[in-house]
Image: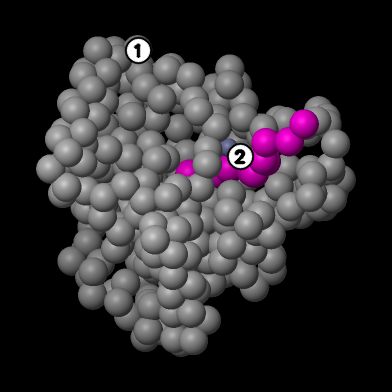
């Protein structure tokens, strides 16, 4: 049953995106964001993983370097538009000073933020106020990685961030990570509908999806069918109710790390440019729809 609901939801979202004109999506975005448009929209770009725990790897390509290359381009494009105030968590030296300091100086508070959120969610589950659904499987993360992700949510809430954009490249569990895998294409994860930031995040995800879809196929991995995936488990999206309703969050898996387009350095760099352009266009369309 849970599976049916989640499949149905994905199908519904895709149908909405496929059938409804984009302007309809954009208009809904407008009514939600008109008041916010007076002051700059605050965006946090999160290039997935870091130099210590770099995520997926194919031969000498590490996911963390790829997400940094793409994330930096999105950051630079958005920064040119004065309607946005843009932040990024990492640069080529590692975490930027703001984030490195935040993790160092506030780790105890981050840990208690995480613990309180988990306890409250357990209470909600027990009371039947939150219903667990079938979730796409994810690799479990080390405690330090989880703590940093909860730290980013805490920081985003405290700093009135309007949207977090998490950038990733995909892989899936298979016997030999050095072989070329079977799946390809992009997928966008967004908070499952019971989370307070779900509705706004889904519209943002839809706008980015509509752009990426112009150039790239959606994931052929059955668990990512349709390419727009509601999720309850990803900390990045506000798992355990850790993001405010106004803090939209989406996690984009731009493709499978071993895909031919990424294996060749020229096509990889061209892909970063195209993906950055399309993502920026999707974000801009959502916050500033053209009438
Ligand atoms: Zn990743």
Q: Residue at x 44, y 70 (%)?
A: 8
Magenta stretch bounds: 166-175
Callout 2: CB less than 8 Å from ligand 1: yes
- Residue carrying label 2: 67
Within 10 angstroms of label 1, few (less than 14), some, or many (20 or more) residues? few
Position above or below: 182 against 242? below
Looking at the rendered structure, the secondary structure element under dot 1 is helix
Image quadrant assignment for residue 154 = top left
* Residue furthest out toward the front: 1
State how far apart marks 2 and 1 are (Cα): 23 Å
Residue 206: percent from left, percent from top: 45, 68
Residue under label 1, please give it: 104
In the image, residue 281 lies in the stretch drawn in magenta: no
Which residue appears at 44% of the width and 86% of the height?
20
- Quadrant of the drawing holding the C terminus: bottom left
Please state which of residues 157 and 12 is positioned toward the viewer in this rendering: 12
What is the x, y in percent for residue 74?
54, 50
Snapshot colouring: one colour
The reply to whether residue 6 is in sight is: no
- Quarter of the image containing the N terminus? bottom left
Any magenta on residue 172?
yes
Give percent across and percent down for residue 279: 54, 59
**Crowding at label 2, few (<14), some or many (≥20) Cα neighbours within 10 Å?**
many
Residue under the image location 59 percent in, 62 percent down: 225
The quarter of the picture showing ligand 1: top right
Residue 8 in view (yes/no): yes
């Amino acid at each position: 049953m849970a599976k049916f609901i989640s499949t149905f939801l994905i199908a519904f979202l895709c149908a909405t995106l496929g059938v409804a004109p984009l302007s309809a999506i954009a208009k809904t975005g407008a009514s939600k964001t008109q008041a916010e448009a007076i002051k700059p929209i605050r965006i946090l770009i999160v290039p997935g993983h870091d130099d210590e725990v770099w995520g997926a790897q194919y031969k000498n390509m590490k996911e963390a370097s790829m997400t940094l290359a793409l994330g930096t381009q999105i950051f630079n494009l958005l920064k040119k538009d004065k309607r946005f105030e843009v932040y990024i968590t990492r640069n080529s030296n590692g975490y930027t000073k703001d984030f490195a300091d935040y993790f160092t100086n506030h780790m105890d508070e981050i840990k208690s933020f995480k613990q309180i959120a988990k306890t409250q969610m357990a209470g909600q589950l027990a009371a039947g106020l939150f219903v667990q659904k079938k979730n796409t499987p994810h690799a479990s993360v080390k405690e330090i990685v989880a703590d940093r992700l909860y730290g980013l949510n805490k920081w985003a809430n405290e700093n009135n961030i309007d949207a977090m954009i998490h950038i990733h490249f995909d892989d899936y569990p298979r016997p030999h990570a050095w072989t070329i895998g079977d799946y390809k294409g992009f997928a966008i994860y967004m908070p499952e509908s019971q989370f307070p930031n779900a509705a706004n995040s889904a519209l943002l995800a839809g706008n980015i999806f509509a752009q990426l879809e112009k150039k790239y196929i959606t994931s052929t991995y059955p668990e990512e069918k349709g390419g727009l995936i509601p999720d309850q488990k990803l900390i990045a999206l506000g798992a355990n109710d850790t993001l405010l309703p106004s803090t939209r969050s989406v996690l984009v898996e731009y493709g499978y790390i071993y895909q031919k387009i990424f294996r060749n350095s020229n096509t990889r760099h061209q892909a970063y440019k195209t993906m950055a352009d399309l993502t920026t266009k999707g974000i801009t369309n959502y916050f500033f729809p053209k009438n």
